[in-house]
Image (cartoon, grey):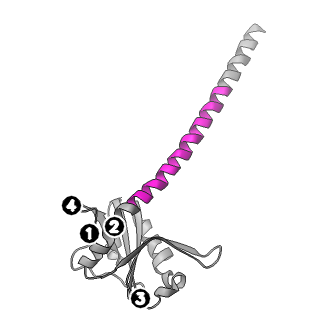
Amino acid sequence: TEQMKKTDEQIKKTDEQMKKTDEQMNKLIKKSSEYDGNWGKLIEALVEPSVLIQFQKRGINVNETFENAKSKLSENEKIEIDILAVNTDVVIAIEVKTTLNTEDVDRHIEKHLIPFKKFFKKYSDCKIYGAVACVKSIKGAIDYAGSKGLFTITFDNETLAVISNKDDFTPKNFSQ
């Protein structure tokens, strides 16, 4: 019976330690998810100041940007665009990712660009262009985005964010 008491005590200690470990893991998971969300905000903050200049260099004279542009038609129908660059006849909807993959490109087109005018009626007479911005990309994602008619915004050594499409790139107009 003495051995059983020792075993019971050891089991209790192990249970207590496991509970503490679970609590610590849950705290770490929560902190990690907060950190991940902040990465996206940081990348948006790095991209946004360069947007107007970069598109103006490409002959698209956007003169305003809006971060986290949201529209809600109903509880199930809502949209959020990371950065909108606009002027009186052009809107560029920019999706910002830390790491870009081809699924992100398709999602941006399907969930943001195609239904854009339904959500943002005040831009119904504008050309709608799309762009993706990222720090890094999964192999082929940048080229894939370009092939789908999206501007691609990446980082270089001289300025923060630059449009990386070739000079002869023609963006797709998603307003049609």
Task: For the N terminus, give its image quadrant.
Answer: top right
- Mark 3 residue type: Cys
- Residue annotated with mark 4: 158
- Mark 4 residue type: Glu
Q: Residue at x 57, y 38 (%)?
A: 25
- Please identify, in this view, whether the residue under mark 2 or under mark 1 is nearer the observer: 2
Extreme top residue here?
A: 2
Q: Is residue 67 magenta?
A: no
Among the two numbered marks 3 and 2 on one chain, the one whose residue lies closer to the N terminus: 2
- Residue annotated with mark 2: 49
Q: Residue at x 34, y 70 (%)?
A: 144
- Mark 1 residue type: Ser
- Please identify, in this view, whether the residue under mark 1 or under mark 3 is nearer the observer: 3
Marks 2 and 4 in Cβ contact (< 8 Å):
no
Disc 3 to disc 2, C-alpha distance = 23 Å
Q: Quadrant of residue 125?
A: bottom left
Residue 164 got which mark?
Answer: 1
Among the two numbered marks 2 and 4 on one chain, the one whose residue lies closer to the N terminus: 2
- Please identify, in this view, whether the residue under mark 3 or under mark 2 is nearer the observer: 2
- Residue annotated with mark 3: 126
Q: Secondary structure at mark 3?
A: loop
Q: Residue at x 33, y 71 (%)?
A: 51
Vertical order, 126 against 76 (above or below)? below
Among the two numbered marks 2 and 1 on one chain, the one whose residue lies closer to the N terminus: 2
* Residue 26 % position (x, y): 59, 41
- Out of 109 and 75, give the one closest to the viewer: 75
Q: Secondary structure at mark 2?
A: helix
Disc 1 to disc 3, C-alpha distance = 24 Å
Among the two numbered marks 4 and 3 on one chain, the one whose residue lies closer to the N terminus: 3
Marks 2 and 1 in Cβ contact (< 8 Å):
no
The boundaries of the magenta stretch are 16-43
- Out of 86 and 162, give the one closest to the viewer: 86
